[in-house]
Amino acid sequence: MKMKYTIPLSLGLLALPFLLAGQSISTSPYSIYGIGLLQDRSTSFTRSIGGTGIAVRDEHNLNPINPASYGAISSPISHLYEAGFYVDANRFENTSLSESTTTGGMSNLNYWFKMKPWWASSLGIAPFSTVSYSISANRQLGISTADYHFTGSGNVNQLFWGNSFSPIKNLSIGFHASFIFGTITKKETMELTNQSSVLTLENKIATRKFDRDIGLQYKINIAEKKSLIIGAVANTGMSLTGKSKSTLLNEAYDTLTTSATRSKEYTLPGYVGAGLSFQTPRSTIAADLRFENWQDANYADNTITFRDSWKVSAGYAYHGNRQASNYWGLIGLRAGFHAQPYPIAIRGEKFPSWGLSSGISVPLFDGRSSLNLTYLFEQFGTTQSGLALQTSQKVMVDLVIRDIWGARRKFD
């Protein structure tokens, strides 16, 4: 039977479906745009201090925010391994309803090692962006009522290699080389209730791309075992080419049409950032300021507009007494915050994105390794113009294992 209608595709309706009445959502409706919600590289240490790290140099913890920091980890540590996991509880609200969901998974996997006394290196894998939403809505089309259902899933990940060099005393420079890869699947289903007809459009986007960013740090000794550190980072942005293929199915999942594979461009913004930290053997206080050039971004979607964004973050870490003779003296405590305007304006609505964090580092085994617990509270979105306010509470657990030259493990 020949269909007398076609499904309204992509992205005119997809851009704002969660504005409609009667919707249900999961994880984040804002991940419907482009390649999803972008995420920064992080470890338990940087997450717990508000995502701050441009000027942070820590002798025992990884800081992937600035690749120049890798050289701060020094002898007797020879290798460092870190694996992180999370559970994320999200709540969504608008003027008519609210809904909660819970997700979880792996947050990062890192390995650090020393190549030379002046050269440190780190390998890792982490999420680059995440797409996860399920949105239902209905709309009147002439004499028929159409039920729409939009779902999206998938991740774009980054496999990165970081390097830090110390050409002269107190100066460190570094870079990350990253391989961005992943597949995102988006589906749109339309059902005309009085005709028992169902059409489904499935759109898969696969992308592969190399990226890079650079950083530097300079340490100023201002007193015995006290220092002021200045840091900077930069990234020129990149264009991702996604291979997109769409398939139109009927209610029996028979293929009606399949589009030819075509390229789709997503231009992501560059950024520059600067940071300052004051460090002593037992504590670190730091702050970052980063400018993201979102005016140059492009998601091939004319229903949204971009605005340049400034991100500010600050944090404090108490490292504990690493020469303590008792267990409790080795425990570390951390806290921080971050805030920035959300870079996408939807239906003219502009709203902030902000978060608070706290963490505790508990030593394991013989005091070399640690179990790090982090709590993050984040909020963005708005209930204006039918949009959703999203509140996220995330608990993260990271295991950090540190190998020391010449030391034999008690659990070998």
Image (cartoon, grey):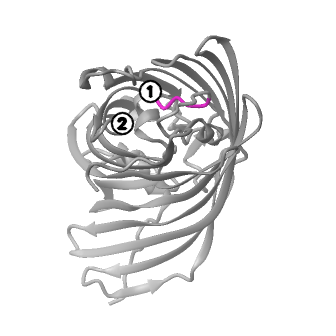
Q: Which residue is mark 2?
A: 386
User: Which numbered circle lies on residue 49?
Assistant: 1
Residue 190 position (above or below residue 176): below
At x 45% / y 85%, what residue is drawn?
257
- Figure quadrant of residue 193: bottom left
279 vs 91, nearest the viewer: 279
Is residue 286 within the magenta segment? Answer: no
Q: Is residue 288 visible?
A: yes
288 vs 89, nearest the viewer: 288
Query: In terms of secondary structure, where does tag 2 sit?
Result: helix
Is residue 52 within the magenta segment? Answer: yes
| Residue type indicated by callout 2 | Gly
Describe residue 279's horizontal placement relative to residue 29 as left or right.
right
- Which is nearer the N-term, disc 2 or disc 1? 1
Q: Is residue 240 visible?
A: no
Residue 383 position (above or below residue 128): above
Q: Residue furthest bottom?
A: 1
User: Which numbered circle lies on residue 306?
Assistant: none
- Figure quadrant of residue 222: top right
Give the quadrant of the N terminus: bottom left
Query: In terms of secondary structure, where does tag 1 sit?
Result: loop
Q: Residue furthest right?
A: 168
- Figure quadrant of residue 139: bottom left
Residue 314 image point, x, y percent: 51, 21
163 vs 131, nearest the viewer: 163
Q: Where are the magenta residues, as a range?
A: 49-54
Describe residue 372's horizontal placement relative to residue 175 as left or right.
left
Residue 60 image point, x, y percent: 47, 35
| Residue type indicated by callout 1 | Ile
Circles 2 and 1 in contact, beta carbons < 8 Å: no
Residue 211 position (above or below residue 29): below
Residue 208 image point, x, y percent: 59, 68
